[in-house]
Image (spheres, rainbow, N blue to C red):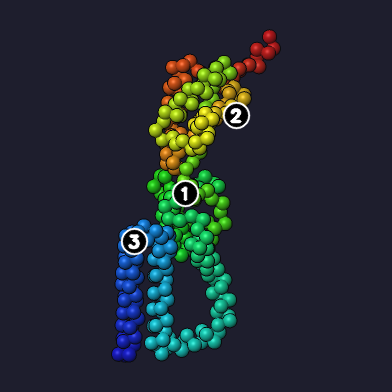
């Protein structure tokens, strides 16, 4: 092996080693900047996170360009590739269509901000979690089982999502309680109202005028007369998604216990079984 080839190999290895060190260093610097200054500057951390994830792509692209420029043999290959740029563009276009689609979708997410880092989002198929990171290719979401859902940006851009943090984090939680037809509806509604209003996580969204007009803090409606139950829906306001979940669980427990003490029956279906042999008698 000639000395010239050895020098080229050293150049290639050295270039990519330096590039890797630069990528790691820049990501650490940007990560520190995001943590320390994003809140102080009142800037959305998602913007910096996306830039951080673009650093590696840019540095390695420059490294490859530098290697092609410095090595005459590769430079001639590069000229040949440019000579056949039309065919190459078609090939690369088909091969990398999905990759470019994800990158463009990631940029659109960054610009239009349907969600950002730390937002709680939910998809129409029921998947729900916290946005951890938006990269060039995909978005990483941590669900409430502490598992990571990795979704390509092109797919998430076409999805219908519910963002619990967009503009106003408050949630009006709808909780349904069922009672039997023999139970007193007014008494059941009074129990639900008392339990809900006494819960520490409930918030009062009424205006001064509504308070003066004695509009109740918790709205209750009979929403259904089912096959074996009367369904009452409670509308309660909380600060955010986590409080809404906790409030829902607590009220289901406390209202059930109050119903037992107050003699209000929580129904269950009754079934009458008729045996065929009895019909012949």
Q: Position of residue 98 (x, y in %)?
A: 54, 65
Q: CA distance from mark 2 to mark 1?
A: 28 Å
Of all residues, the one furthest to the top in this rendering is 281
* Residue on which the image places disc 2: 223
Q: Secondary structure at mark 2?
A: strand
Q: Are marks 2 and 1 in contact (CB under 8 Å)?
A: no
Nearer to us: label 3 or label 1: 3
**Can you say which quadrant of the picture contains the C terminus?**
top right
In primary-sequence order, the first of circles 3 and 1 is 3
* Residue on which the image places disc 3: 37
Closer to the camera in the image, 156 or 5: 156
Q: Residues within 10 Å of mark 2 (few under 14, many from 20)?
A: few
Nearer to us: label 2 or label 3: 3
Residue 10 visible in image: yes
* Residue on which the image places disc 1: 165
Identified at 52% across, 45% down, the residue is: 126
């Amino acid at each position: 092996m000639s000395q010239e080839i050895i020098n080229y190999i050293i150049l290639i290895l050295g270039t990519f080693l330096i590039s890797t060190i630069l990528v790691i260093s820049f990501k650490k610097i940007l990560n520190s900047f995001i943590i320390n200054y994003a809140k102080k500057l009142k800037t959305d951390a998602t913007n910096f996170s996306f830039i951080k994830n673009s650093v590696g792509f840019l540095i390695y692209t420059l490294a490859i360009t530098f290697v092609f420029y410095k090595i005459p043999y590769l430079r001639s290959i590069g000229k040949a590739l440019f000579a056949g740029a039309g065919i190459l563009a078609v090939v690369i276009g088909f091969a990398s269509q999905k990759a470019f689609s994800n990158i463009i979708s990631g940029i659109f997410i960054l610009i239009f901000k349907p969600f950002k880092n730390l937002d709680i989002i939910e998809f129409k198929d029921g998947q729900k979690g916290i946005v951890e990171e938006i990269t060039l290719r995909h978005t990483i979401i941590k669900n409430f089982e502490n598992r990571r859902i990795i979704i390509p940006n092109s797919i998430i851009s076409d999805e219908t999502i519910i963002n619990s943090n967009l503009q106003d984090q408050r949630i009006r939680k709808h909780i349904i309680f069922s009672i039997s037809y023999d139970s007193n509806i007014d008494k059941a509604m009074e129990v639900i109202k008392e339990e809900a209003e006494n819960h520490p996580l409930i918030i009062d969204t009424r205006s001064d005028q509504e308070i003066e007009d004695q509009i109740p803090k918790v709205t209750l409606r009979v929403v259904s007369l089912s096959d074996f139950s009367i369904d009452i829906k409670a509308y309660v306001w909380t600060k955010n998604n986590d409080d809404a979940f906790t409030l829902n669980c607590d009220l289901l427990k406390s209202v059930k216990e109050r119903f037992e003490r107050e003699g209000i029956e929580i129904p269950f279906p009754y079934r009458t079984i008729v045996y065929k042999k009895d019909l012949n008698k």
